[in-house]
């Protein structure tokens, strides 16, 4: 995530393990960086989630990306926690009947959300 932008929104059906996490990064990280104008000089922010610490993830990204490790669920330095909290609040205002409704509302709120609302929550 850039300071002023977030990457591609990816929905996951099933369990998010380290291999799914790695696939998401490999398929979306470069495109997301390009979308917010990065020159390829990225810092990948990771917390201590086991998916982030898995051997394949560490090996795949240790050579090509700078990494910033932060404590899990620590909103002062891990802004993704603020993003999730803001999205959760926005989604609760809607009547969600099924997974399709949830995905549609989530995607709409994700794209509409003013970035300042989660940067300095």
Image: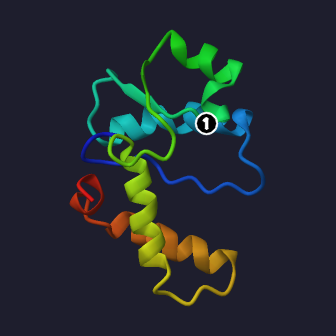
In which quadrant will I find the N terminus? top left
The quarter of the picture where the C terminus appears is: bottom left
Find residue 90 and report its horizontal and vertical position in percent.
41, 76
Residue 46 higher or lower than 10, as above or below? above
**Picture quarter containing residue 117?**
bottom left
Q: Looking at the picture, tell me which residue is in the foreground, 118 or 24.
A: 118
Count how many numbered circles sit on residues in the image.
1
Which residue appears farthest toward the bottom when viewing the image? 95
Left or right: 113 in relation to 116: right
Residue 82 left/right relative to 102: left
> Looking at the image, is 63 positioned above or below residue 22?
above
Q: Position of residue 37 (x, y in %)?
A: 26, 36
Residue picked out by circle 1: 49
- Secondary structure beneath label 1: loop
Residue 44 placement (x, y as % from top left): 43, 28
Residue ID at (54%, 18%): 61
Kindly identify the residue that appears in the image at 67 percent across and 54 percent down.
12
Q: Residue furthest right?
A: 14
Residue, x 36% and y 47% (percent of image)?
Answer: 79
Task: State the image coordinates of residue 113 (x, y, percent, origin top left).
Answer: 32, 67
């Amino acid at each position: 995530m850039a300071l002023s932008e977030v990457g591609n929104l990816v929905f996951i059906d099933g369990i998010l393990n380290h291999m799914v996490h790695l696939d998401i990064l490999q398929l979306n990280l470069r495109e997301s960086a390009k979308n917010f104008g990065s020159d390829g000089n990225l810092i990948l922010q990771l917390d201590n989630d086991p998916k982030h610490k898995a051997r394949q993830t560490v090996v795949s990204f240790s050579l090509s990306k700078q990494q910033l490790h932060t404590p899990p669920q620590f909103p002062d330095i891990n802004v993704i926690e603020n993003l999730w909290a803001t999205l959760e609040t926005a989604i609760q205002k809607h009547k969600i009947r099924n997974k399709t409704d949830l995905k549609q509302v989530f995607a709409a709120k994700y794209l509409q959300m003013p970035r300042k609302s989660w940067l300095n929550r």
